[in-house]
Amino acid sequence: MRQSGRIRPIGSDPRLLRIGHAAPESIGPMQLVFCVITPFLGAALAAWAARLGPNVAAWIAGAATLAAGGWLAQGAMDTFAGATLVERISWMPTVGLDLVFRLDGLGLLFALMILGIGFLIVLYARYYFSPQDPLGRFYCFMLLFMGSMLGLVLSENLIQLLIFWELTSLSSFLLISYWHQRAEARNGARMALAVTGMGGLALLGGVLLMGEIVGSYELSAVLAAGDLIRSHPLYLPMLVLILLGAFTKSAQFPFHFWLPNAMAAPTPVSAYLHSATMVKAGVFLLARLFPVLSGTAEWFWLVGLTGLLTLVIGAVIALFKHDLKGLLAYSTISHLGLITMLFGIGTPLAALAGVFHIINHATFKASLFMAAGIIDHETGTRDMRRINGLWGYMPYTATLAMVAAAAMAGVPLFNGFLSKELFFAEAVGVASLYRFGWLVPAAVTFAGIFAVAYSLRFVHDVFFNGKPVDLPRTPHEPPRWMKVPVEVLVAICILVGMLPALTVEPLLAVAAAGVLQGPLPDHNLAIWHGFSPALWMSVIALAGGGLVYLGRRPLFALADRVEGRFEARRGYDWLVAGVFTLTAWVTARLDTGSLQRMLLFFVLSALLLGLTGWWGQAVPLTGPRPLLPVGPAGGLAALGLMSTAVLVVVLHRQRLTALILLGAVGLGCALSFLYFSAPDLALTQLSVEVVTVILLLLALYFLPQTTPAESSRIRQGRDLLLALVAGGGAAALAWAVLTRPQASIADWFLANSLPGGGGTNVVNVILVDFRGYDTLGEITVLALAALGIYAMLEQLQLTGPARDDQGRPWDPDLHPAIMASLVRLLLPLALLVSVYILLRGHNQPGGGFIAGLITAVALIMQYLANGVAWTHARLPGDLHPLIGAGLLIATLTGLGSLLLGYPFLTSTFTHIHWPLGDFELASAMAFDLGVYLVVVGATLLILIHLGLVHDASHPSADQTADASGAD
Amino acid sequence: MEALLALIIGTLTACGVYLILRARTFPVVLGLTFLSYAVNLFLFAMGRLVVGRPPLIDPSAAAYTDPLPQALVLTAIVIGFAMTAFVIMLALKARAELGNDHVDGMHEP
């Protein structure tokens, strides 16, 4: 027994091996794997179960979320103790590709947010959607997104992280375009996908550079190589590419415009994706790579400045948005800028504050989005100029929303205040470092003022400020369970805000340790820090925010006037339009709908590519390999072959003549194979030639018998020149290769064919054993081609000519008696030969391909000589089962070895003693039988159905066939 | 012998290229067949030319030719047939749908 799957002489690139061995080996229970897989399984189940009712889908989504949480919890205890859990599933070890998951503090924090808020969203969404909305689809997409997000935050391998990164982009596209009948949803989804997709591409570049620098894509190796990365000459390009990925995902200026447009999504989607998860993926990446990327001036300026700009711009625009969700979207942008800026500042305490604000922002923003969804749900609009005075209608919801808004504004006793204080303190710390450093706390306070102002507007405009204006519905309190998720989140806001040390401190500590990959800085999560500069900034922000809101009317008037003038999405629109124009221009130039022209371009570019490779190389055309002598027979045969080929071209207008000559060329090729020690190829070429000529003859019947002369002389001359150059190039290339010595991996096959594969015909052993997987693919292609042809012929109606091209009617004797009888006599003989060829194929020239072709030719001869009716009366005409059986046998042979614990398609063989001598029986023979059946079935299917088209076009043929068959 | 085979490959390529640039479907199919002959011979030639040493294991044989290109070309020949069949069916389909056998399907029958 032998394992053919193990030996792969090709593709063992030592550089890739190096990457594969960089990470520590750790094999443990697979709870992280299950944690990531569970939502994906739940997605399929929820989509299917939606037919049983919306509640079933919701229960499944909730159960999947809880189950994933259960798997996570098993590793969480170790993580709190400071351990990093790594789980590895070996996937393609030879090229260093493993599925590796990692759980440390940072991953745990994100996984908890994804699952926790995800669970609340499952509950909330059940009551948010109307009965017309397909809930199964929502839960399916949402669980897909949840799984992708979990995979992202729990990946140890950066390439794997990237795959999940792209999956979040794709699944969020599906979620944003949930109401796909609305144009704004489609546009918003497309914009989000385009922007984050481009960022993903940049990130791929950055990650590849990082892998090149470190020599590994595993986080544990990358995180240990900070100095190497920062001092590398490729640090800056790598940093820019990675930051492009993070900034597009986290909606940083100037890529922020996709987020407000993504508000066309249903509100549960916004609450989930655009507060706690998707947009946090970018800052997650910043946090994840913080230890290796931060600490340089480039990092400080790029990340810090982008964050600061986003913080200020988002806060200012948010105040002027009349759409409830638009305000929240810009506020989200602003808060993401805040977090980005904290990581940009780069001190350990700033990173800790960033992690803290990630938690706080997720809780208050998710609850605000949910509150906005309730308001939208109850009033039928999101326009704050119409929604006023809702306090009178839904005081309970109003209270919840006010608490969350206070957290967003940074009011003391709520969680947002704590992280904002830390942020202000860090901004003050920056001020002393640079000459105009005082600008930083000033700008930050300015943003803080606007944050208070827009939070005030959210509360005052919606719940007070007079009476509602012309609402589509009369609002009242929402269903009980729609409020529960908001209550939970608001409770967290208050608890964290009042008792930070008792509630969030352990999680924050372990998460920050995960970010820093080292000891934590001294920090104190107290509400009162004394009269520090940060406190004064808070006071200024609160007071200033109040003043700005009081003076809002002239500001609003100004904003309405400049509305739409400075929109970043204009640049996007311009870019997209430009790309469309460019592609249309290129397509119009290249694709004129003319095959001749396209083929001309094709040949020209192939020649050009070949020539550029050739040009300027000082390599002689002729190599040192000794040449074979030319015998008179060989020379004559070669001359005959070439002149026949030229004759085909000269006579190609006489199609029948050209076809017969083409057959002769094919036979010449078979002779070449035979002469140069390739008996298998010669046999294959010989039998394929017969089938091809028959096929083309059958087809030619329906086509004009001659080709009209319509190309101009100039065109013919041009094509001739091109053909000569191409032929010359091919000949030169062949000559250059043939005269050079060869280094081949053939020795391995020759040495292992008999001991490993049990056959002396090495070509056949390669086909059915060493490279059996390839052969399985090839016979599948053959089967598909046959089925495709069958499908094409089914609807085909063609009429053949009644006379030949010289005006003579066809011979009425379609099936001459002598030929018919002879062919019938030949059939058993031909079948015997093919069985013999099949059986001996493992040791002597032959095998499934050749035997199949011989059988097919023998059977087709019956059709040709005796007619379809006669043959169909004696042979089953349905060939699909034959093809299917062949593929099944070949696959089962492979699976059989899998069942016995060997890799797919491992062969086994034994010797049996027959009276005629020693005989080897290899399981590969069963595989070859499958090949044989597919070849017979596919060839016959193609030819017989083309023949049937003949009969349909030739009504008299059947009667003649019957007359002939009856005697 | 090497020069002759190189010439054969060159001739087959030249014939194939000339024919695929014709305006009617049948010559194009012939041209594709020529090109597959040329490609198959070329791939086969990557194992270099050896006379009288087929890759059949035999204790008395001193050396063998390279079996790997042969295995590759063998399936390529069969797949080439499937491709030819598919293309000629497309030609028939075009003839049935468009009423003529021009490759661009836009000239009168």
Image (cartoon, grey):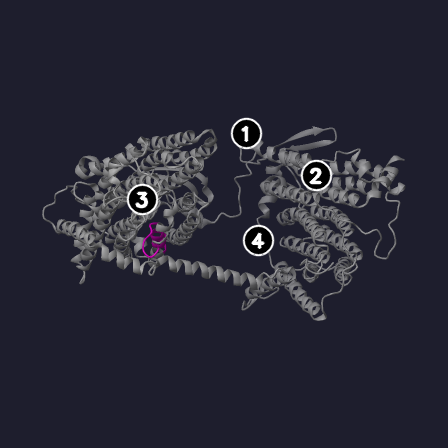
Q: Is residue A261 magenta?
A: no
Main secondary-structure element of the magenta-colored stretch: helix
In x, y percent, where is residue A877? 74, 36
Q: Are marks 1 and 2 in contact (CB under 8 Å)?
A: no
Residue closer to the observer: A499 or A608: A499
Outermost residue toward the left?
A: A531
Label annotation for residue A153: none
Q: Nearer the viewer, mark 2 or mark 3?
A: 3
Q: Is residue B15 left or right of residue A269?
A: right
| Mark before the other along the chain sequence, 1 or 3 | 3
Which residue is denoted by mark 4 in the rendering? A743
Nearer to us: label 1 or label 2? 2
Q: Position of residue A667 (x, y in %)?
A: 76, 52
Label 3 CA crowd tier, 10 Å (few <14, some 14–19, many 20+): many
The residue tagged with tag 4: helix, strand or loop?
Answer: loop
State the residue at coordinates (71%, 56%): B25
Q: How far separated are the C-alphas under marks 1 and 3?
A: 51 Å
- Circles 3 and 4 on the same chain: yes
| Residues drawn in magenta | A241-255
Between A304 and A122, the one lying in front of the other is A122
Point 49% across, 47% down: residue: A12
Q: What's under tag 2, amino acid-wise? A: Gly
Q: Nearer the viewer, mark 1 or mark 3?
A: 3
Q: Residues within 10 Å of mark 1 (few under 14, many from 20)?
A: few
Say which residue label 1 marks.
A900
Tag 3 secondary structure: helix
Q: Which residue is mark 3?
A: A275
Q: CA distance from mark 2 to mark 4?
A: 39 Å
Q: Is residue A214 in view?
A: no
Label for residue A937? 2
Q: Position of residue A187 (x, y in %)?
A: 43, 51
